[in-house]
Image (cartoon, helix red, strand yellow):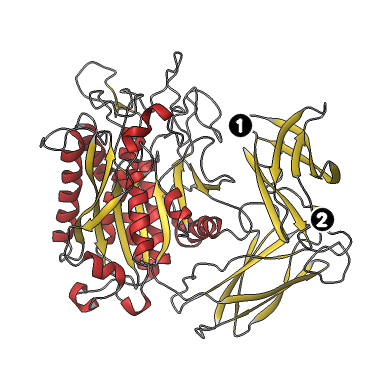
Amino acid sequence: MRILITLLLLPLFLTAQTNFSLSHPQAFEVLKGDYDPADYAASQPITDPMTVAQDIASTVSPDSLQVYITRLSQFGTRNSGSDTVSNSAGIGASRRWIEQQFRQFSQTNEDRLLTGMFWFDQNICGKGRHSNPVAILPGTNPANNGVILIEGHFDSRCDVLCDVNCAAEGVEDNATGTALVMELARVMSRFSFPNTIVFMATTAEEQGLFGAAAFAQFAQTNNIPIRAVLNNDVIGGVICGETSSSPSCPGLNHVDSTSVRLFSSGSFNSPHKQLARYIKLQYKEHLLPTAAVPMNIRIMSPEDRSGRGGDHIPFRERGFPAMRFTAANEHGDASNGPNYDDRQHTSDDILGVDTDGDQVIDSFFVQFNYLARNAIINGNAAASAARAVPKPVITTVTRSGGTCFVSWTDPANVGVFRVALRSLTNDWDTVFTVSGVLEGLFPCNAVGSVYASVATVDAAGVESLFTGEKVAITSGTNEPLTTYSESHLKLLPNRPNPFDEATWISYWADEKPQYQRAMVRVTDREGRIRMEQPVDINAGMNEVLYVHGYGASGLLTCTLLMDGKVLDSRQMVFAN
């Protein structure tokens, strides 16, 4: 969707979200951790992480996903302002059907899911009352209360924001994400996890992320400890459109069924990027060794595609770690101009076409096996995070030559740790395993910045979420340093480099300087300004994201200026 809403449409959304409620009578107590876990215990608990991972991989069904998506496409439109009374068409019928499916999944699995609606009031497209269908799997250890949220918006739209008459089947955007959430509710309700997992289909994403924003506000107001948010939006298509929002795909009709993009906010010391890295690590260690079709998990630099947004953003804004899964290829940028021929945000966002005239769709725009693989990645990561392994506390990171010294404390007395080091990429370079110690020397890059974080490992071999990052920066000498000693301000190598469609420009300050105006400028070989952005210079690490888009290559120069004076310059090489 487009984040910016025109002034003409603002009267449709002036009221804020209010009057939050959960229809299931025990849902709020479970989210708060105020319940007896025996009330929701499985008769034969399945808890072993490798068993869970392999069961998710073998049980997620492409056929089930196809059934859900086909049914969602049959409601005519799921616009947030559409019919709420009909049993066959509109937003009301679709949300009741999703809730009914959640209820059936629960009945099949000892009634362990708390199913219902999360309701809120807001004037959206002429409707004042809205709801997110929800299924909650209570954790087995409420004393260590935490919540993992898997979400995907179920509403749809055509070009005009509140057009309730256009047949917006919304298959790729976002029946695919909704089906993924539903399938994981079905599959994962068999298992037992220390933390609670919430499966939620959000509404009114297309009008401004309102369903997600309502639940994020509800969670913050009531101190519900959301530890990770996995948002799924445009996650099942494999065909590139003529226009797709940067970071984009190679070109019209390019097909990619083995890559998925993970978007998240920030770079250095970002809990959102750390969550994305954690998801990729869990895939590499739990699923990749036995995967029939290996997946390329791409950790993207920006929080979302250029000019776009998704339901992970309201959670990030309220301090919850959050990220977004999106297919590698996307059919359109939703610009809907006069020459716009792509499917996204049109009545052509459908299941597929009948190529032989037998009235049966035989060419699909969604690849269900691809969507199943993305569901498995989601489920495995959520299962690992829901084990609620306590984090350590990282204390020191220094470097001498090509060796980094990292130390930490272990408040929970776990005893086994993963130490992750990162340099020029969005992903970790290396993850080391150590036990019985609270410090270590690790090989690392001899020059440039190095970022370290630590996780604990439980007896079953599953990591906690990783700590925030600490940076070790050195001048290239053998003296261990935590800051640059030869200058008060310095540009650092951009990351990643060579980079994808965007790169983080970082600069370090020993202390906050006195200045009137600071600027980061990017120029090309001919000296033309490609970006000029006012920035703040604070003590420690500072970052700004530069997005150049897909399909560019060449050499750029980045310059840091303060009150018109050049402080430092550095070249950046990019190719994609």
Query: On residue 500, which mark appears?
Result: none
**Dot 2 corresponds to which residue?**
489
Q: Residues within 10 Å of mark 1 (few under 14, many from 20)?
A: some
Query: What residue is rendered at 19% in x and 31% in y?
Result: 74
Q: Nearer the viewer, residue 492 or 210?
A: 210
Quadrant into which the N terminus falls:
top left
Q: Nearer the viewer, residue 208 or 132?
A: 208
Q: Report which quarter residue 112 is drawn in.
A: bottom left
Disc 2 + disc 1, Cβ < 8 Å: no
Please identify the residue farthest to the top as the structure is shown: 338
Query: What residue is rendered at 21% in x and 62% in y?
Result: 113
Name the mark nearer the viewer: 2 or 1: 2
- In the figure, is residue 510 to the left or right of 139? right
Residue type marked 1: Tyr
Q: Callout 2: helix, strand or loop?
A: strand
Residue 377 against residue 517 in the figure, above or below: below
Spatial CA span between label 2 and label 1:
31 Å
Q: Nearer the viewer, residue 424 or 569?
A: 569
Quadrant into which the C terminus falls:
top right
Residue 497 against residue 428 in the figure, above or below: above
Q: Residues within 10 Å of mark 2 (few under 14, many from 20)?
A: many
In the rendered image, residue 148, in percent from the top left (x then y), is placed at: 37, 62
Q: Report which quarter residue 210 is drawn in.
A: top left
Query: What residue is rendered at 81% in x and 69% in y?
Result: 481
Residue 174 against residue 159 in the figure, above or below: below
* Residue 561 visible somewhere in the drawing: yes
Residue type marked 2: Leu
* Residue 141 visible somewhere in the drawing: no
**Dot 1 corresponds to which residue?**
550
